[in-house]
Image (cartoon, rainbow, N blue to C red):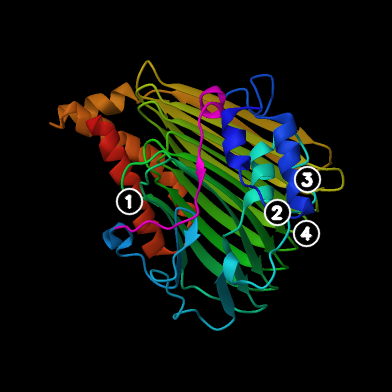
Amino acid sequence: MNALLDSLASGFDGDAARRAALDAALRDGLPGPRSEAWKYTPLRALERRTFAPSTDMPAFDAAAIAGIAAPRLVFVNGRFDAAHSDTGALPAGMTLQALSSLPARFGTDARIAQRADEVFARLNAALADEGFVLRVEAGARIDLPVHLVFLGVPQANDRAWHLRHRIELGEGARAVVMEHHLAAGEHAHLANHAMSITLAARAQLIHARAQCEAARATSFLRTDAALASAAGYHRLDLELGAALSRHELNVRLEGDNARLSANGVLLADGRRHVDTRLGIEHIARDTACDLLWRGIGSGRGRAVFHGGITIHAGADGSDANLSNKNLLLSEGAEVDTQPVLEIHADEVKAAHGATVGQLDPTAMFYLRSRGLPEAEARQLLTAAFCREPLTVIDDPALRDALAVALDASLQQLAVA
């Protein structure tokens, strides 16, 4: 047993299914360097830490979430904050609720948390007691963004919280979702999220997430999505905060002509460790995925990217594209990128590529010759490099807000 799992398991009080998930996590422990899924993200330092459960909601300055429009749900240190939430503007055909307000909780997909390396999914299955549920009725086409706010606030002891979320879109429905992972002051808490997404036939989900956690925080997220025929999932992830963050994005294209566009930016500056792991499965015919990711390594930061695409037998006519380009801005930074493509079908189109390089010296020379200081020139080129993934979001106002968050992080990088 290690200190981390000991502290997370203390005071457990759950049903048999939750007990089984917790027992499995305790039995197998944290994955080590021999685990293929974790070999670039060591957890040795984390396993020595202890966290108290997040049972109360601390006060915070409301300025931390100023400007985030309704409808919104707010969670503070893993607890639902009804006072700062506002669902009065929910459009017809949409429901948005905190998990704690529902008469019955939903379980975990049987395919999840079966392997020893899925320890944080197991912990979530055992310990999650809060989160959100968003449902959109069939045929409801809603362009108004829904905002989900997850705020970390300093407390006397380091806290851990486990939240489980669900998004369900009916046939032909459309929704726009924005996640804000923010900090109101410095802390070293641990957040462990799990999200399941189900898109019925012809449903369309636009989904953006800005992870701007505190500099010493730890963040884990697992997303599992299933798309029916002609459904479309368009997603952007900005990994801009936390000392250690990992996102596992798993998408099953289960219906003919299902489409996935998943883009992201990984910013690994200072001593930050950022890990993103994609697992995309083409199950049905004529499905498509476009994956466009950019990584920045600066200081002694480390960015880890695994882009896994599997085209199963019978998924003829699939079209899969993955591009992962990375910039190293310092000698001490590191980028580990691993594109993986498995094809078991005929008549498919597939391309994948990954690069790690430095800023173009010709472009730097041009900007310097026009009078720009070196730091400003580097920031300008770095911002341009990171801009392309944002095009996956078709809402102009939301895309502009994401660009502001990205630019703010890049400006801090330039100063550092």
Crowding around mark 2 (Cα neighbors within 10 Å: few <14, some 14 to 19, many 20+) is few
Crowding around mark 4 (Cα neighbors within 10 Å: few <14, some 14 to 19, many 20+) is many
Q: Residue at x 58, y 66 (%)?
A: 100
Rounded to the nearest whole Å, what is the CA distance between mark 4 and mark 1?
Answer: 42 Å
Question: Which tag, 1 or 2, sits closer to the chain's start?
Answer: 2
Question: Which tag, 3 or 4, sits closer to the chain's start?
Answer: 3
Q: Are marks 1 and 2 in contact (CB under 8 Å)?
A: no
* Residue 291 in view: yes
Rounded to the nearest whole Å, what is the CA distance between mark 2 and mark 4?
Answer: 36 Å
Rounded to the nearest whole Å, what is the CA distance between mark 3 and mark 4?
Answer: 32 Å
Q: Quadrant of the N terminus?
A: top right
Q: Nearer the viewer, mark 1 or mark 3?
A: 3
Rounded to the nearest whole Å, what is the CA distance between mark 1 and mark 2?
Answer: 31 Å
Question: Which tag, 2 or 3, sits closer to the chain's start?
Answer: 2
Q: Which residue is mark 1?
A: 184
> Which residues, given as a range, are shown in magenta?
43-60
Q: Nearer the viewer, mark 4 or mark 1?
A: 1
**Residue 170 magenta-highlighted:** no
Question: Which tag, 1 or 3, sits closer to the chain's start?
Answer: 3
Q: Which residue is mark 3?
A: 20
Q: Nearer the viewer, mark 2 or mark 3?
A: 2
Q: Position of residue 306 (x, y in %)?
A: 61, 32
Q: Which residue is mark 2?
A: 14
Q: Quadrant of residue 358?
A: top left
Q: Which residue is mark 4?
A: 255
Q: As drawn, is 187 to the left or to the right of 198?
A: left
Q: Nearer the viewer, mark 1 or mark 2?
A: 2
Rounded to the nearest whole Å, what is the CA distance between mark 2 and mark 3?
Answer: 10 Å
Instruction: Give the residue furthest to the front.
Output: 11
Q: Nearer the viewer, mark 3 or mark 4?
A: 3
